Image (tube, helix red, strand yellow):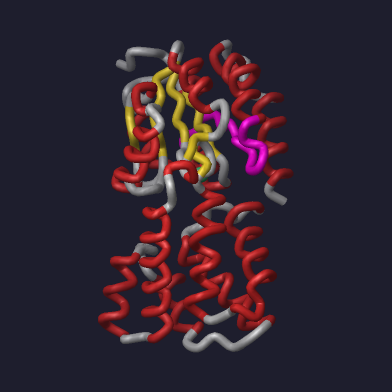
Amino acid sequence: MADKKYLICIDSDGCAMDTMNSKHNRCFGPYLIREWGLENWETSILKRWNEVNLYTLTRGINRFQGLYRALEEVAEKYTPIDGLEDLRQWVENTPELSNDSLEREIAKTDSHILKKALAWSETVNKGVEALEEREKRPFPGVRESLAYARDFAELAVVSSANRQAVLDEWGAHGLMGYMDAVMAQDAGSKARCIRELAKKGYDRDRILMVGDALGDYKAAQENGVFFYPILACREAESWQEFREEGGPRFRDGDYGGAYQKEVLEAFMDNLK
Ligand SMILES: [Mg+2]
């Protein structure tokens, strides 16, 4: 049985940690331009990259799905992209959208575009690792929110980032001491992480998932638990509302119904 009666699951990238904007603005987008030599259309391609990956309902999609979408659009609007069909086939059919799986496909097909996709993805990883600490900070109000919530709930990171990155990023800011568990990429999908954590024995209406992307909401939905959105570009405000309204309502059993509906609508509107 759980020590406390409440469980709050918290996503990391773009929710607790202000990492998504710098990763996309400094690494994903610019490296795409460089790898495919798209400098002529840089401004409009980067704008679209950020719309898809940061500011609309596709926020947080897998990097390779994002890459395929971007290159497909480039081919339609600006210039042909060699081998695009190979990339589409792989993205749509691979059981796992990862560098490892991409390497295995390259070994089989020797596809030029897949090699470029891998080079891009590896450069992105190096670039993200090299981002300075100040570009990987928690959003304002996160620490206060964890301190507040810890009084009545067990707290878990539920993230699809790799485990070490989560431990490093949260640890660097002294946030690990607030957390009871870390469930990351190696623990499976976010829905699975919530399901595993729930096995400690909480009532479903005493579990809350806090996240910034549609995938977080879907993971909550799959488990029949509540969802609290951190709105992109309004993160500090969202965390403040969490302490002042969302958290207290959740604790007092007053979260479901009208309030859940209201915050969900604000979330969907914000990603239109
Ligand atoms: Mg996120």
Comparing 146 with 105, the one in front is: 146
- x and y, in percent, of residue 73 in the image: 63, 76
Please give the name of the residue rendered at 59% of the width and 77% of the height, measured from the top-left corner. Answer: 72
**Residue 63: percent from the left, percent from the top?**
47, 62
- Looking at the rendering, in which quadrant would you find the N terminus? top left
Q: Which residues are magenta?
A: 223-236
The correct choice, above or below, for 56 with respect to 13 in the image is below
Residue 90 lies, in percent from the top left, at 41, 75
**Percent position (x, y) of residue 191?**
42, 41
- Whether residue 56 is situated above or below residue 144 in the rendered picture: below
**Of 120 and 267, the residue lying toward us:** 120
- The question of residue 232 being in magenta is answered with yes
**How many labels sit on residues?**
0
Task: Look at 51% across and 71% down and name the residue there.
Answer: 32
| Residue 39 is one of the magenta-drawn residues | no
Which of the two residues, 238 or 37, is positioned nearer the viewer here?
A: 37
Residue 99 sits in which quadrant?
bottom left
* Residue nearer the viewer, 74 or 143: 143
Q: Residue at x 69, y 81 (%)?
A: 77
Residue lying at 49% horizontally and 45% vertically, measured from the top left = 135
Instruction: Check the image and report above or below for 155 versus 51.
Output: above
